[in-house]
Image (spheres, rainbow, N blue to C red):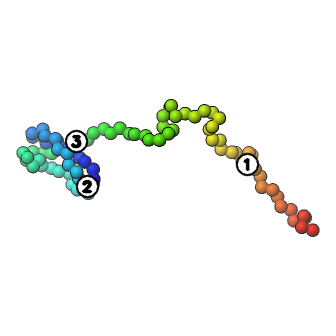
Amino acid sequence: MPTYEYLCRSCGQRLEVFQSFRERPLKTHDGCGGELQKVFHARGVVFKGSGFYATDSRSNGSKSKTKTDSEKPKAEAVSDAADD
């Protein structure tokens, strides 16, 4: 369950509440009866694993190269004349 932070507009107290996504946001502060406002924070993005940073670059020799149609091996044609 996510944790939400609320700020009471009357007394200035901050509350952290565990709420389901389906629950409605809180409206009043139980302590003083003031109006609650949901506080939003900027969250950083964390990229885990290799390949996300400039320091993860590979040498030119190990890059995977896709083969074009002209480079792919062609299937050998089977002739019916060999069966005679």
Which residue is located at x 20 percent, y 51 percent?
25
- For badge 3, the amino acid type reads Val
Residue tagged by mark 2?
Answer: 20
Residue tagged by mark 3?
Answer: 39
- From the top left corner, tell me how far across and down residue 5 is, in percent: 21, 44
Residue tagged by mark 1?
Answer: 72
Which residue is located at x 16 percent, y 41 percent?
14
Mark 2 or 3, nearer chain start = 2
Q: Is mark 1 on a helix, strand or loop?
A: loop
Neighbor class of circle 3 (other Cα within 10 Å; few <14, some 14-19, many 20+) is few
- From the top left corner, tell me how far across and down residue 78 is, in percent: 83, 61
- For badge 1, the amino acid type reads Lys
Mark 1 or 3, nearer chain start = 3
Q: What element carries label 3?
A: strand
Question: In this rendering, would 33 be left or right of 54?
Answer: left
Residue farthest along the right direction in this orientation: 84
Mark 2 or 1, nearer chain start = 2
Which residue is located at x 23 percent, y 47 percent?
4
Contact between marks 2 and 1 (CB within 8 A): the answer is: no
Quadrant containing the C terminus in the rendered view: bottom right
- From the top left corner, tell me how far across and down residue 75 is, in percent: 77, 55
